[in-house]
Amino acid sequence: MKVAAKKVSGGKLVRVKVDISDGRIASAKIEGDFFLHPESGVELLEASLLGTTILATDNELISRLTSVKDANSLDLVGFSVEDVVDVLKSALRSE
Amino acid sequence: MQWRVIKTSTNSAALNMALDKAVMNSIIAGKSLPTIRFYRWQPSAVSIGFFQSLNDEVDVAKCKELGVDIVRRQTGGGAVYHDYNGELTYSIIGPEALFPKNINKSYELICGWICDALKDLGMSDASFVPINDIIVGGKKISGNAQTRSSKLLLQHGTILWDLDVAKMFSLLKVADEKIRDKMITAVEERVTRVKDHSSANLEQVEEAMIKAFTKNKEFAFDDFTVEEKQDAERIAREKYGNDEWNYKR
């Protein structure tokens, strides 16, 4: 499992845990002390990352998460989809 | 709109969380009024936010050693140590329409009431720090967390009265990123307590909170209904006292 975290400036801690299989995200968890309304939305964001190639660009990942966020009227408090992607990319780069 | 105020009750962690849910169920069913309640935790407990990993945030072995309960909240936010002897928790549950639609504004409103209560107790510099904190003397004295569902808003939070900060941080794993970010190596420097600033006891803190929360509201003191208590026992058993919920992340 690859893990990375960051404290969002003026916001909350975001931690991403990913497992990789055949160059694609096989599992993803977005954890932290942020708020997300409705809370069930976190699983939708996590599910949207499954199957994504680890070579996806930041914009592709941001776009994917933003689509889910907008389609489900998710309210992210203390973090953003950009923060999730930033941490995800850090996790993918980690040993 | 009439509010119900339930004075401090002392319960286990699972039951405290379940009572909030039972009250929500009862309000939705039209059987209970919007409610403000106060409570303490016995045994003392650690609650974690909905999105946190229990094993990442809590020293489970240490909690078991010290007889400290652990529960996952329905709300986001961070890990909190609820010391039976050192803390008062509140919940406010009511129709979403009574609060600002904007989540940040609703935190500001409700946390503003807590600031009023603390000012009443002599802490004139009590202030709300977005997203969800209240500080006195530049240190955190209250944390708060909110959820919304079925057109209801639930916000709950703590007021630190006399907290054993060293014990608290022995039970919690504070992420290095947070400490690095604030450039403070001693986590004890980040929090404060009512007792450091006021001679008020927990009862007086409750009184001040009731006064602040009920200002400009029609209210009456009451207790949980029998149905709420039974529903809460069931929810505590099925959800908040269950490893499947608490260890879901």
Image (tube, coloured by chain):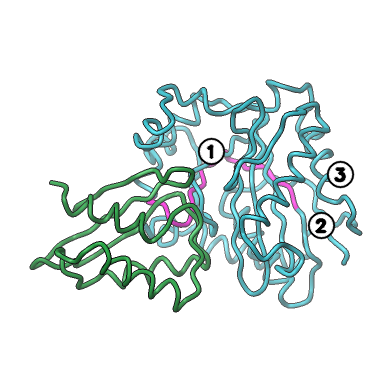
Q: Which mark is residue B211?
A: 3
**What amino acid is at disc 3?**
Lys
Residue range of the region highlighted in magenta in the rendering: B37-53
Image vertical order of residue B65 relative to residue B215, above or below = above
**What amino acid is at disc 2?**
Asp
Q: Badge 2, how many Cα within 10 Å: few under 14, some, many 20+?
A: some
The residue under label 2 is B223
| Labelled pair 3, 1 in contact (Cβ < 8 Å) | no
Q: Quadrant of the N terminus of chain B?
A: bottom right
Colour chosen for chain A: green
The residue under label 1 is B81
Q: Nearer the viewer, residue B232 or B190?
A: B190
Q: Nearer the viewer, residue A56 or B35?
A: A56
Chain letter for mark 1:
B
Whole-percent x and y of residue B162?
A: 65, 26
- Where residue A29 sits, quadrant-wise, is bottom left
Label 1 element class: strand
Label 2 element class: loop
Spatial CA distance of label 2 from label 3 is 18 Å
